[in-house]
Amino acid sequence: MKMYIFSVKFLAIVFFLLENVIRSYQQLPIPANYHQMDLHKASGPESIAFDCKNEGPYVGVSDGRILKWQGLNLGWKEFAVTSPNRDKKVCDGATNIDLEPTCGRPLGLKFNRKTCDLYIADAYFGLLAVGPNGGKARQLVASAEGIPFKLTNALDIDTDTGMIYFTDSSNTFQRRHIFLSVMSFDRTGRLLKYDPRTKQVTVMYKGLAFPNGVALSKDNSFLLVAESMKMRILKFNLGNEGNGYVFEQFVQLSRTPDNVKRNEKGEFWVGLNSGREGIQDDLFGFDMDPVGIKYDEDGKVLKQVDGNGGLTFSSVSEIEEFNGELYIGSVLKPYVGILSA
């Protein structure tokens, strides 16, 4: 019996080591040249975008501004603001969440690479746009079917048609009351689309539990949507709109997904922004701490970013892959993290 127990334990250790060899192959290591683009008197670069000239990154921060990276010598520069009545003396550098309804809180960002306009999902002011020279963003739409948006969150753009797909995470709770949304398991979130040609907004699907990140497939045939409270990614097929929008589950996760971003190859990065204590393996005490996962179009895991138990990445909202680097956004931190893809 003792020999049997020893054999079982030995085999378990062998399988554990093999599993970690496989995981180390899939998992993206944290290289020594990881670095950060620090923000000055600002925090919370939740989403990241690059313009039609490949300049940037651009980030939306907690005080309602959108900043553009000008390079190491010039750093960050104010590019745009989302609030129509913003008071710089009150808002600049603000981190008080109760000031967000006044100052704005830009979340999702995406450039239309044909028009060079930047589209913005502001948690309080709805879907906005600003031209390539920046300035004060103009509001495109702030309600649908007579119901005002309460937490406009993420977006993506079909550059062939100009159609904008976006989420309103709740029609009951604002972002500053997000805790109440979680506690009540609010299911009033909506997936929407906006046609800039007709200036009409359409509700594609309602009754979602905090719909969050949005990403179109490379051929624009389907749309991925993070349903955060159910810890899953949904796949909406766009080819048969006349019969309604039907979704299937793309992947089920063990952590809460935030933003979803597609790279040039058509692969999807999902930012995981919760459970920062790591995933405990009771048998061996091994902590896995995935903060980002890359999937192919079939939902197969390609790579993972390990947060090292929160020591390297303690808050991740988005991973944007651009020119061979991963730009890592956070709704809390005062910097953008960068590592090699």
Image (tube, rainbow, N blue to C red):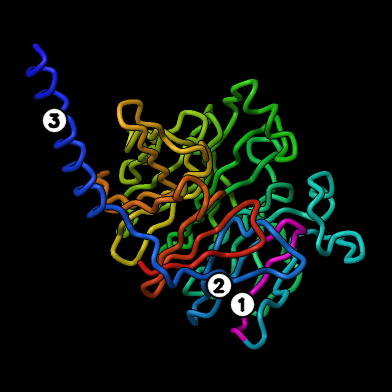
Residue 329: percent from the left, percent from the top? 55, 58
Q: Residue at x 70, y 74 (%)?
A: 79
Of 196 and 27, nearer the camera is: 27
Q: Residue 10 carries which label?
A: 3
Q: Which residue is drawn at 53% across and 64% down?
A: 337
Q: Which mark is residue 38?
A: none
Of label 3 and label 1, which has the lower sequence position?
A: 3
Question: How would you rate the neighbour count of disc 2 (Cα within 10 Å): few for under 14, some for 14-19, many for 20 or more?
Answer: many
| Callout 1 touching callout 2 (CB < 8 Å) | yes
- Element assignment for label 1: strand
Of 236 and 66, nearer the camera is: 66
* Amino acid under disc 1: Trp
- Element assignment for label 3: helix
Please tell me whether mark 2 or mark 3 is closer to you in this view.
Answer: 3
Residue 28: percent from the left, percent from the top? 33, 58
| Callout 2 touching callout 3 (CB < 8 Å) | no
Please tell me whether mark 3 or mark 1 is closer to you in this view.
Answer: 3
Which region is colored magenta? 61-72
Marks 3 and 1, how far apart in space? 53 Å
Quadrant of the rendered image containing residue 261: bottom left
Residue 88: percent from the left, percent from the top? 88, 66
Assess whether residue 314 is covered by the magenta stretch: no
Q: Label 2, on which residue? A: 57
Residue 270: percent from the left, percent from the top? 42, 49
Of label 1 and label 2, which has the lower sequence position?
A: 2
Assess whether residue 71 is covered by the magenta stretch: yes
The residue sitting at the front extreme is 2
Marks 2 and 3, how far apart in space? 49 Å
Marks 1 and 2, how far apart in space? 6 Å
* Amino acid under disc 2: Pro
